[in-house]
Amino acid sequence: MRRSHVVIESTLGLLCSLFLPVVAAAAHCQDADLIVRNAHIVTMESPQKTVTAMAVRDGKILALGSDEELAGCASVRTKVLDLQKRTVLPGLIDVHTHVMEWTKGILRGQIEAGYPTVHSISEITREVGHRATTLNSGQWILGSGWDDTKLAEQRYITRQDLDPVSPNNPVYLVHVSGHLSVANSAALERAGVTKDTPDPQGGVIERDKSGKPTGILKDTAMLLVSEVLPKDPPDIYVRAAKLISEKAAEVGLTTIHDIFISPDEMRGYQDAYQRGWLKIRVQMSPPIGSIADAEKMAEMGVHTGFGDDHLKFGAAKMFADGGMGARTIAIYPPGVIGEPDNLGVLRWKAEDMQKAHLIAAAAGWQLETHAIGDRAIDQVLDSYARVISQLGLKDPRFRIVHGGISTPAVQKRMRQLNVIVDGNPPFVYWIGSWFTKYGPGRVRWSYPAKSYIENGVIEAAGSDVDVTPLSPWWGLWAAVVRKDLQTDQVLAPEERITVQEALTLYTRNGAYAGFEEDKKGSLAPGKLADFIVVDRDVLSVPADELKDVQVLETWVGGQKIYEGPRASKLPQ
Ligand SMILES: [Zn+2]
């Protein structure tokens, strides 16, 4: 039984059955602002339902049907778009990104140390050395995106790599996982980190045999340096929000959730929205790092859903464990291969997590908690179960972010609690090599997809930018093929899903995770006119082409917000 469809359809069922909407809506369908016709419109209303025409007025969909059925919706002022059989999809939804963190990095001119830009530590040190020659002594060199598993040397970067090329400029390079960084000696000195500095709660200062820091800082230990970084110019946030809107529209995303954002970043979004720069829709998820944070959020008097269809508060975000790349996810024995005692880190004492969850949920916040290892997921599910029963919540839609090691036992509990997984389809391709460090038994249940559907767990999709690229086409492709970039091997082939199922993660299930299934996630009368035109029929192209799909046009609320270079081939 595919529960994801049952739940969502029963809600949609209030609106329509398969044929009623077209006829009923077409009857009072008139004076449309826009009619899209002669198109291959994949409505995502129910599997395989397609129509050729759609009428739009006041930012919403008026009717769907055949070209003939909708001809009467036009008046003299109606703009008619003949798409010459091109494919139209609902605007795509990414429920887990750190887009502002990413675009701020672009605006700062940070060193891009990710694959495939760089392939070795020596390339990174060359770039750092080059930057150092262009700066005054003491100025910071920042970068991000490096991944030890994709570097020729197959190891972490250390301060010893960076010190010779940048003795006088502090260097701080964040790993692609976001769960560890490397700092050179000058940066450690600025942060006051010495061999006597104790590991902070929930973090690790990696040390060599003599006890000296290697430069690698994991999880909360990263704060030691990140808190002494130079301040950004005040206008960076609003500019970053504008850049997000542009980048998202280019790849067909009309809604994104930005996770773990700061007050400055929220202000940036709000200012960009007021200036008319934010053309896509955004849900902002503020972080809770302590019980005091939860109390502060409750005192603020706003909660999930506050805002409007363009910009609103999403879920409250917490972290239960670390990352696979940093080998800090909380697992049950056996430990990481080569580190049998490493069962990862839990960031919260169970009772404290539960207290913070309870305070936030009682104040009206949807909860989303990062948990990758199965031990961490269990801790979060225990906490969710208590909060749900204590508050008597009927439809909380609490979310597990990542749900990396999702065993059958874990999935069963998710189903029982109606917990949604913010999964990451592109991880299998981009970071599948990290799964293997946890052993073949865990690879089988790493970032599953098919078993979620079979077990009735609703999964929405996230790129986790900049862990993987923003383009959802990587994730749609990876969900279908599940190939690991490094070995070209198919990881857990039983977890492959169809294109239709993968699209569901990026449309209907994304809308459901954000409590927006009455407004988006499919193309239906009354829903927001958020849709994209793509350059090929995604339902019938060979699977390998999915990653190459180009977005020709992106429309939000009936307005065209992006037109790709190849869109000119469309008759206007
Ligand atoms: Zn994330």
Image (cartoon, helix red, strand yellow):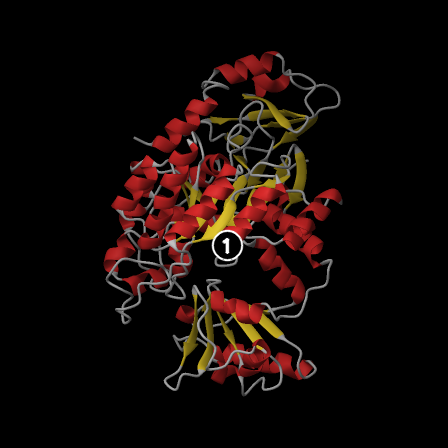
Q: Position of residue 275 (x, y in %)?
A: 76, 45
- Element on which disc 1 rests: loop
Residue 137 located left or right of residue 18: right
**How many numbered circles does the render carry?**
1
Q: Position of residue 186 (x, y in %)?
A: 58, 82
Residue type, label 1: Ser
Image quarter of residue 131: bottom right
The residue depicted at 55 percent of the width and 13 percent of the height is 24
Q: Position of residue 394 (x, y in %)?
A: 42, 29
Question: Which residue is at the front of the view, 460 or 153?
Answer: 460
Residue 221 higher or lower than 571, as above or below: below
Q: Quadrant of the N terminus?
A: top left
Specify few, some or many for label 1: CA neighbours under 10 Å numbering under 14, 14-19, or 20 or more.
Answer: some
Q: Which residue corresponds to mark 1?
A: 290
Question: Which residue is at the front of the view, 48 or 426?
Answer: 426
Can residue 425 be seen in this snapshot?
Answer: no
